[in-house]
Structures are given as structure tokens and as C-alpha cells.
Image (spheres, rainbow, N blue to C red):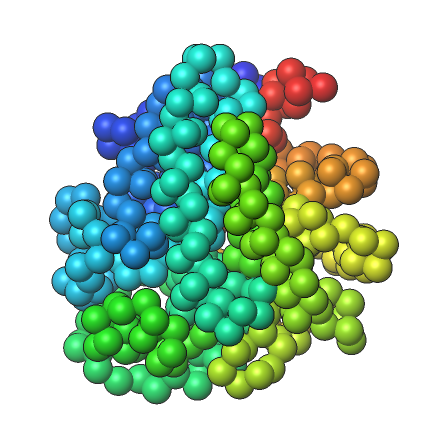
Amino acid sequence: MSSTDLDNKAKSILIENDQGGYTIPTKGLYPYQWNWDSVFVALGFDTFDQNRAWREIEMLFEGQWRDGMVPHILFRKDDPSYFPGPSVWGTDGGPIPSSGHSQPPVAASVVQTLVEHDRTGTAQERAAALLPKLMDWHRWYLAYRDPKNLGVIAVIHPWESGRDNLPDWDDALRAVEVKDIAPYERKDTSHVDPAMRPHKEDYDRYLSIVAACRNVGWDPARVAETCPFFVADPGVTFIFLRANRDLLKLAERLGRNREAEEIRGWIARMEKGAKTLWHEGLKAHVAFDERSGKLSDGISSASFLAPYAGIADDTTLSALQAHFDRIASKVRYLMPSYDPDHKGYEPLRYWRGPVWAMINYMIAQGFAEAGDTARAERLRADTARLIETGGFAEYFSPETGAGAGGGAFSWTSAIWLSWASPSHAKQAA
Ligand code: DGY
């Protein structure tokens, strides 16, 4: 397929997955609105229908909880093809049935991008309407995912990280007692090869964490205090720090001085806190289990998001460049979601090795901003080759380039349109 054919195919995937203002990640496997999927999808719509791009994010915020949280899934209609559905979550925090925790807060960054690209003349107004909602969500993150004021953001569930079965969670997840779960039937493995999905032992614990939080009524302070899983995540921490920098730009552009001042305080807190995640032996930022006090022992693709978060001092950048080149000598396509030299690495199992297009987009953005345009371009070229050979898959083998997980995937299409496609790269140059 030529790149123009792929551009057209990517657009048609977004249009087919559109449910009337919001987009599902893919048919079958994920039939609802997912938080960070939707936000990346807005970048895809931004290339051909900016009004629709804004609508995607506005509809996500329609599900915001009273306490400020923006849930990871909005169950706008019942769909028996997905498990666990709304009755398992048992939440009551917002206007739309939803899951009970959040997902990486990329929204402020994408809103800032939409404002910069605006051709409609309505962006300032739409961004101004979203600003207080973004502020509330970010305040919620600081209050309930960093209750000890460490300057790092914890996740209460592997699903909240968006990187479900990452080896970083293995020890903390194993420590979760399996209890309070009714017999259940997974649906994901009827849509996708089980070898590409988490194990049953993982699912038992995913559901046990949901049960523990449901037992405290999803009260955010009680969840933070009692949830059996509470791990500071370099992925969410770096995405949140970046989102705060973009939110600050937005507040300044809109002349919202009080908000800008508040956000500057958040950035200072996070910049200091990020050091907590630095693993001196590995020379990279890793996860930190706040319950056990242990750092994880491997490098994930989120370790490479430090420059995206604006952490690009010489020590960090040169260590990441060395890891980048080492990993590039082991696999054909970058950036695997986990270090191929680690025992937990599996090239086709979801977040234990596969390459994800939207992570490459964020890593490349950070490297380019830090002046490393060569490695940023390598990531773009690899992402383009993966899509050219593996199609618009959910994720890809870093070794063979084979597409894996769900097909006709929305965020892969969006990242193609907004960044990886050669036609976009030419326009941007
Ligand atoms: C799933 O169902 O696998 C999702 O990743 C949870 O968000």
C-alpha cells in the first residue's frame, strides 16, 4: 500500500470506530470510550476534522467525576462483549457509568496541540471551557495519587497505568491477595490470541484490586490509603509532568494567572519528585512500589519519556541514549515496551515487549526537543515501517514487526496520520 492509501485507510478506521462524537479503540476487544485512546485519537482527527477532534475530548470530559477524576473507561452503552463491565466496577462517581480509576493524563498536552494547530478560530474558546476541568483532574491526581507529596504519581491498578501487564508490576501484583471475586469469564481472549494477553493469575488480581476499591465505595482518600496496589509509575509521572507544562502554556495563553501560578507549583513538586524514580544502578527512571518501598529492576519504554517530561539533563539524556543504542542492537524495531535484556521481556505479550505507536510518538517528541533529532527520526521511521508491514495493529513485535493484539486500531491510525505517515512528515518538514 502506498502512503496515501495508508492515509486513507487510517482515516477510514477512525470514521468506522466513531460512535457519534467519541471513538472506540477497536471493534470487539474494546467497545467503549477509553481515556487515553480517545485523547490520542483526537490528534488523528485534528489532521482532517478539527471540530471532531475537540468533540472527542469534550465527550471524554462529560464523564468526569464529581471529585475531578476522569475515568479510564466510559460505559456509554452496555456491551456484553467486554469484561469487566459496569456492574463489576460498581461506581457512582460521575454522570456516566464508568470504571473506577483513571488513565495517563495526556489530555492537556493534546489540547495544547489542538490550540497550536487551530484552523477553526474556535480553539481558544473550547480550550477555555476545558481548562477548569483539566485543573480539577490534575488536582485530583496530586491529592489522591501522590498523597504523601513525593512528587511522583502512583497507580492503584495496572490498568490505571495503561500498561497493564508490564513486568514492573509483577512483584506488587503478586502481593495482592486474590479475594472477593465471583467466578468470571474473560472476553479479551475470545477476541485476541491468549499468548498476546495477560495471564489468568494477573486477571484474578486485577479483579481483586477492583473488589478492594469497590469495598471502600471508590472513595479516593480511602482508595489511596487502603488499595493493595499503589505503585509510582514513571509513565504516568512523566506524562503528568509534561501535561502540567502544557497546561501552564494554555493558562498563560488564556491569561489565567491564578491557575498558572498553581501549575508552576505542581511542576516544581514533580521535577523534584521525579528523582525518587531514578535507579542509580540501571541509570534510568523506574517504578517505585510505595507499599513495599522497592524500585523495580528493569527499563521500560516509559523510562525514555523523561525528556518528554522536560527532564533532559546531561546525565539522564546520555544514559537514555546509551540504553536506546543498546536496545537498538537487540531488536529490529524500536521502542520495545520492556528491555529485551530483562528476564520479563516477551516480544508479543502486550506490555512485556511489543512496540506501541503512541509511546514512540511521545518518546520522539521528547528526544527531538532535547536536540536528539536523529533518534527521534529513527523512532518515526520505525513506527512508519511497522504500520506499513504490520497494518494498523494495536501493537507490534519489536523483533519481526508483526502486528499483534486488536486490528483496525484507532490510536495507531491517529498516530500514523498525525506523525508517522511520510506525507505528514513531509508537510511538517
Ligand atoms: C483491557 O481490558 O485489557 C484494558 O486494557 C483495560 O483497560
Q: Which of these two is toward me, 319 or 139?
A: 139
Depth check: give the residue in front, 258 or 168.
258
Residue 373 position in % (x across, y down): 79, 36
Above or below: residue 148 compared with residue 406 = below
Q: In front: 91, or 386?
A: 91
> Height in image: 257 above or below 254?
below
Which corner quadrant holds the N terminus? Answer: top right
Quarter assignment of residue 422: top right
Is residue 85 at least partly visible in the picture?
Answer: no
Observer-nearest residue: 121 or 32?
121
What number of labels is visible? 0
- Horizontally, is 22 left or right of 413 in the view? left
User: Is 91 rendered above or below residue 109?
Assistant: below
Q: Quadrant of residue 249?
A: top right
Horizontal relation, residue 372 to residue 293: left or right = right
At x 42%, y 76%, the residue is 229
At 65% across and 69% down in the image, what residue appears?
277
Determine whether, in the image, residue 45 is placed left or right of residue 221. right
Examine the image and state in which quarter residue 338 appears: bottom right
Picture coordinates of residue 310, whole percent (x, y): 69, 48
Q: Position of residue 175 (x, y in %)?
A: 44, 86
Q: Could you tell me which residue is drawn at 33 percent across and 52 percent down?
A: 68
Quadrant occupied by the C terminus: top right
- Quick check: 132 left or right of 187? right
- Can the viewer see residue 384? yes
Residue 348: % across, % down = 52, 58
Q: Residue at x 32, y 40 (%)?
A: 60
